[in-house]
Amino acid sequence: MRKYTLLLLILGILMPSVASAQKRRSAKKAKKEEVVEDPRLKIMREATRKVVFIDSMVVEKATFISHIPLSKECGNILQKNGLGQYTNELGDRNFSAVFDRSDSLNHITMSDYIANQWTKPTTIRGIGNADANYPYLMPDGTTLYYAQKGENSIGGYDIFVTRYNPDNSAFLRPENIGMPFASEANDYLYVIDETQQLGYFVTDRRQPEGMVCIYIFIPSNSRQIYPSEEYTEEQIKSLSELRRIADTWGNGKEREAALERLKKAKATFAQRNGEKDRPASMSELDKMRQRAADMERELAATRKVYANATEDRKNMMREGLINTEQDLESLLLLIRQKEKEERNKNYQ
């Protein structure tokens, strides 16, 4: 009995000490695991630009440019081995991301078409020595957007903008265009189609390996931010990260008009690519069938991503998925009508 009492006394003394030691170890571990946020994130978040994002779609990273229905006035953007190339509408200026073995970085080069030949590509001056990709020159011939990662980005690639200075034949010091286009993920491409008054932004944030999301937005000449007196800190953070594009729609009127422009842009793009890439002998009905097959493949890939997405991601994808399904349904109905007309002609 005396031994049992002594044992209880010892345990009573040791247990608080053990518990305290465990608490200290847990606190130390929690402190060690605490992630310190990059102070630039807070500054960028407070300056998040107000932008209406009308739609989005998830596609394969290797072919994302083929899904962006740019007007011919935007020039031509290509992907080759994960590197972006841009040629203006006139076909006399080219910007390309080129891998340099000497420093194992991608650099953007510029070349001009003079006297029926391209000049030797030269690395453009003024944008630094960080890894760069996917250049896009605005029709003004001066404003250049591109993706870059390095000390001035907050994650992987961020979108930067610079402008050409004819006085010294160089580009001005580039600026990070900020949130909601900047993120701790990879943000690859930023394009404004002035003809359609639509913008396209490509990022891999919240996407599985090998996939990216293309966001379609309404460009604006003026920069407005979300005022802190009207939005909570959490709301601004959500908007800065593009968690839910429906939160940017406002009353929806701007979005409805922009969706109509997007629909026309897709139709024009499909027609232009069909005329360029498909045989001249292909009938209109065959072109429609080909387009339906392309849409079905796109839908299959999007549904696969949707099935494994988080609830927030599903909310963002749902609208675009429904719109694509409706477009495909309308196209299939039109195909059936055309097929019926063809059959009736054969029996006349």
Image: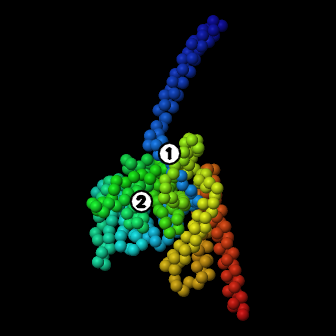
Please determine whether, in this image, residue 300 is positioned above or below residue 242: below
Q: Quadrant of residue 16?
A: top right
Left/right of residue 55 with respect to residue 98 in the rendered view: right
Q: Residue at x 65, y 74 (%)?
A: 331
Please determine whether, in this image, residue 37 is positioned above or below residue 197: above
Residue 234, percent across and down? 57, 42
Observer-nearest residue: 231 or 74? Answer: 231
For badge 1, the amino acid type reads: Arg
Left/right of residue 336 with respect to residue 170 in the rendered view: right
Q: Answer yes or no: is residue 84 visible.
A: no
Give whichever of discs 1 and 2 has the lower sequence position: 1
Please determine whether, in this image, residue 294 is positioned above or below residue 316: below
Residue 304, percent across and down? 60, 59
Neighbour tally class for label 1: few under 14, some 14-19, many 20 plus, Cα within 10 Å: many
Q: What is the quadrant of the N terminus in the image?
A: top right
The residue indicated by pointer 2 is 145
Left/right of residue 56 with respect to residue 92 in the rendered view: right
For badge 2, the amino acid type reads: Tyr
Residue 31, percent across and down? 49, 31
Q: Residue at x 57, y 47 (%)?
A: 238
Task: Kindly identify which numbered label has been placed on residue 158.
Answer: none
The residue indicated by pointer 1 is 45
Q: Residue at x 72, y 91 (%)?
A: 347
**Mark 2 secondary-structure assignment:** strand
Q: Which residue is situated farthest in the front direction here?
A: 222
Residue 231, percent across and down? 58, 44
